[in-house]
Structures are given as structure tokens and as C-alpha cells.
Image (spheres, rainbow, N blue to C red):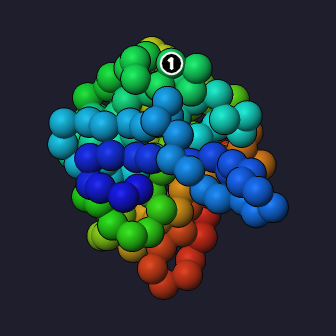
Amino acid sequence: QLKANEISMFKVVAQDKSYQFVEDEAYKITVQGTIDYCDFDRDFNHIVLVIDGHTLQLRSMSDIRKIKNSIKLNEGVSAMSLRCLQLSGNGKQCVLSGGNDKPYFYVIDVESGTQKKFKSNSLSDGYSPCFINGDTQYVFMGDIAGRMEIWD
């Protein structure tokens, strides 16, 4: 991500006897606002973005400029350097954690927009949520103290 409101993707191009990274304009995403988080599904078919901490966007990689679904989040999230978003391997759900002093996560159906909140009673924060092996059966989340939980 080169700009706060833009994601650029690159391709490898052979030139003479060397290779170079060249920006691929077909896969450039520009939004009104700030892209806080983004993630791809396992097969690189979909991308989800969190914009301005309040909107989740689903886009298809086959038509990246078209927003497939836009979901207003039940609770806003703050941008941070730690990972707080993961799209499932099949691209149908994502998990989004609260971050600093917010020991919870949401599982969001990216097609219907359904959001389900899960709150931890033992963690102090909500960081690095992920679906175990990309499947939606189990969700992992940790906190700043190194404690971890796996939910089913």
C-alpha cells in the first residue's frame, strides 16, 4: 500500500536477462477515505477492505474496481500496525478483531453482511484474528500479553 487511500499491485516482467516489478494498473484500488486493513482469500479470488474503520468492502479480483458488497460495521475499528482482519480461505467470511483494550472479534458473512460478535473474558485486547488453516470452523485471537484463545 503506497498511499492511505490506494492499493497498488505489481507483476513481474522479464526485460532482457533480468526481471522487474511493474505496477499493474488493472489491479489498482483507489477509495474515498483511508484503507485501514485488507486481505485476500486463499485462491486470490476476492479482496476485503476496511475503510475509515467503519466500512467493509468485498471486491472480486476479476473486476477489482467494482464493489461487490459494502457493509457498515456494527462497531468501528482503529487502524494499527498489528493484523486485525482475515478473510476465510473460501472468501465467504472474515474475522475482524477489536484491537487495543477491546478483547472481542466479529465473524462477518461478507455476502449477506451478517455480523456476529464474540467477546473474550480472559484476553485484554483483540489482535491477529485468524481462521485456523483458512477454514471457518475455528478462530484464533491473541492479546498483547501473549495470551491466546481458539474459538469454535
Amino acid type, mark 1: Asp
Quarter occupied by the N terminus: bottom left
Report which quarter residue 75 is drawn in: top left
Residue found at the very far right of the displayed protein: 17
Residue found at the very far front of the displayed protein: 16
Q: Is residue 121 above or below residue 133?
A: below
**Image coords of residue 65 (percent x, y):** 40, 23
Quarter occupied by the C terminus: top right
**Image coords of residue 74 (percent x, y):** 26, 35
Q: Is residue 45 above or below residue 6?
A: above
Q: Is residue 77 visible?
A: no
Instruction: Tell me if mark 1 has few (under 14), some (14-19) or many (20+) residues whose alpha carbon lies within 10 angstroms of its own.
Output: few
Residue found at the very far bottom of the displayed protein: 145
Q: Residue at x 44, y 47 (%)?
A: 8
Q: How many marks?
A: 1
Relative to 136, is 93 on the left or the right? left
Q: Is residue 79 visible?
A: yes
Dot 1 falls on a residue whose secondary structure is helix
Report which quarter residue 61 is drawn in: top right
112, 149: nearer the viewer: 112
Relative to 82, is 74 on the left or the right? left
Q: Which residue does the numbered mark 1 point to in the structure image?
A: 63
Q: Residue at x 58, y 20 (%)?
A: 62
Q: Residue at x 26, y 36 (%)?
A: 31
Q: Residue at x 40, y 18 (%)?
A: 66
Q: Is residue 144 above or below residue 28?
A: below
81, 132: nearer the viewer: 81
Relative to 120, is 46 on the left or the right? right
**Image coords of residue 100 (percent x, y):** 31, 70
